[in-house]
């Protein structure tokens, strides 16, 4: 396993993070346990979840909420020594019930959500507590006050963000600095070969502030996982995925042909491309099986040549660089 620091912090995490969004919804508890066992045996020490994972992410369908955290908590409860072997990350923001204060980033909700996550995870602390989305209705002074309190109480250690714009990251860091806080340790963003908007302003902001990037959806909701080959083999894609396939078919054909030339699976190439970016701390792998996890780990040893990186850029062009040069001078 390869390890690196989480952004500018002294915390060391594996470059592949185990994503657990599928636990409880697409993967039952027994299978989830096997995946976590395999991850730990492979040296993965970075486990990522969220309070809302485990069921339909809708405020009127809250019965599924917290199941992913419950499953992780049950796994930790089987062998309490596991807790000290992993960096445990979860998230706050999403509606956890239909009440007006059961969502977002008020100090009231942050405190209650953290305590609920701790109960489900069967632990006394969360290593990385991430804001799942920006809440521009709540002042940063209130958010950081709530996070400071949780840090003082030993309930969380580091704070991260997810789905923040570049200027949100800058605002968060400036406010944290005024309170003499470390601020954000990491940002989780949608980032893969098909979705490169964060290259405009988010990645430059992260590099400037020393914040680690944790890409989610690294294989583009399945698009970069060899989807054309799967259809050929008889596996049916969802209607939404089929529409994307039709829209991007020429690029997908070129991409899968390139992966075939490299004698690598498309998913591994997609993960390896992300790992080449020095701002990326860890890539989230959200496997549904042990076999998928084992395959994804191959990305750690795949080194893509400059020629291959250029071919990937030609197939999946980004926004043209960083702002403002991407659209001005």
Image (cartoon, grey):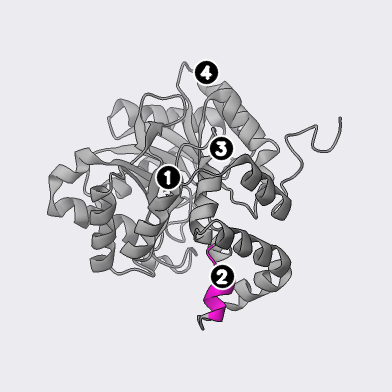
Q: Tell me the magenta residue range.
A: 225-232
Q: Residue at left 38%, top 51%?
A: 297
Mark 2 or mark 4: name the one nearer the start of the chain: 4
Q: Which mark is residue 177?
A: 4
**In terms of secondary structure, where does tag 1 sit?**
helix
Q: Which mark is residue 277?
A: 3
Mark 2 or mark 3: name the one nearer the start of the chain: 2
**In terms of secondary structure, where does tag 3 sit?**
loop
Q: Position of residue 239 (x, y in %)?
A: 61, 78
- Separation of residues labelled 2 and 4 (CA atoms): 45 Å
Q: Residue at left 27%, top 53%?
A: 120
Q: Position of residue 224 (x, y in %)?
A: 57, 61
**In terms of secondary structure, where does tag 4 sit?**
helix
Residue for badge 1: 301
Q: Is residue 262 left or right of residue 11?
A: right
- Separation of residues labelled 4 and 1 (CA atoms): 38 Å
Q: Position of residue 159 (x, y in %)?
A: 43, 33
Out of 307 and 223, give the one closest to the viewer.
Answer: 307
Name the mark nearer the viewer: 4 or 3.
3
Would you say residue 145 is visible in this rendering? yes
Name the mark nearer the viewer: 1 or 3.
1
**In terms of secondary structure, where does tag 2 sit?**
helix
Query: Residue 327's image quarter?
Result: top right
* Mark 2 burial class by Cα count in 10 Å: few <14, some 14-19, many 20+: many
Mark 4 or mark 1: name the one nearer the start of the chain: 4
Out of 153 and 305, give the one closest to the viewer.
Answer: 305
* Mark 4 burial class by Cα count in 10 Å: few <14, some 14-19, many 20+: few
């Amino acid at each position: 396993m390869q390890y690196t620091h989480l952004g500018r912090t002294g915390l060391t995490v594996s470059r592949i993070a185990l994503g657990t969004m599928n636990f409880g919804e697409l993967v039952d508890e027994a299978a989830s346990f096997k995946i976590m066992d395999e991850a730990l045996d492979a040296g993965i020490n970075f486990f990522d979840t969220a309070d809302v994972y485990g069921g339909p992410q809708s405020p009127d369908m809250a019965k599924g909420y917290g199941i992913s955290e419950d499953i992780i908590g049950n796994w930790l409860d089987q062998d309490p020594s596991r807790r000290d072997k992993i960096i445990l990350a979860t998230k706050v923001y999403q509606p956890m019930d239909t009440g007006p204060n059961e969502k977002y980033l008020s100090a009231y909700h942050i405190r209650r959500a953290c305590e609920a996550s701790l109960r489900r995870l069967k632990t006394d602390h969360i290593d990385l507590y991430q804001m799942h989305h920006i809440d521009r209705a709540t002042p940063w002074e209130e958010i950081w006050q709530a996070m400071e309190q949780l840090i003082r109480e030993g309930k969380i250690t580091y704070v991260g963000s997810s789905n923040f714009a570049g200027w949100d990251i800058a605002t968060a860091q400036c406010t944290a600095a005024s309170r003499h806080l470390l601020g954000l340790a990491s940002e989780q963003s949608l980032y893969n070969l098909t979705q490169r908007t964060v290259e405009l302003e988010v990645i430059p902001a992260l590099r400037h502030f020393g914040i680690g990037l944790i890409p989610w959806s690294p294989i583009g909701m399945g698009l970069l996982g060899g989807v054309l080959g799967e259809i050929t083999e008889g596996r049916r894609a969802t209607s939404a995925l089929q529409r994307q396939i039709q829209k991007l078919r020429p690029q997908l054909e070129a991409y899968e042909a390139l992966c075939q030339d490299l004698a690598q699976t498309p998913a591994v190439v997609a993960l390896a491309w992300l790992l080449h970016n020095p701002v990326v701390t860890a890539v989230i792998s959200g496997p549904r099986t042990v076999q998928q996890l084992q395959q994804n780990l191959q990305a750690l040893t795949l080194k893509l040549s400059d020629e291959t990186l250029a071919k990937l850029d030609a197939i999946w062009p980004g926004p043209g660089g960083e702002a403002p040069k991407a659209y001005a001078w």
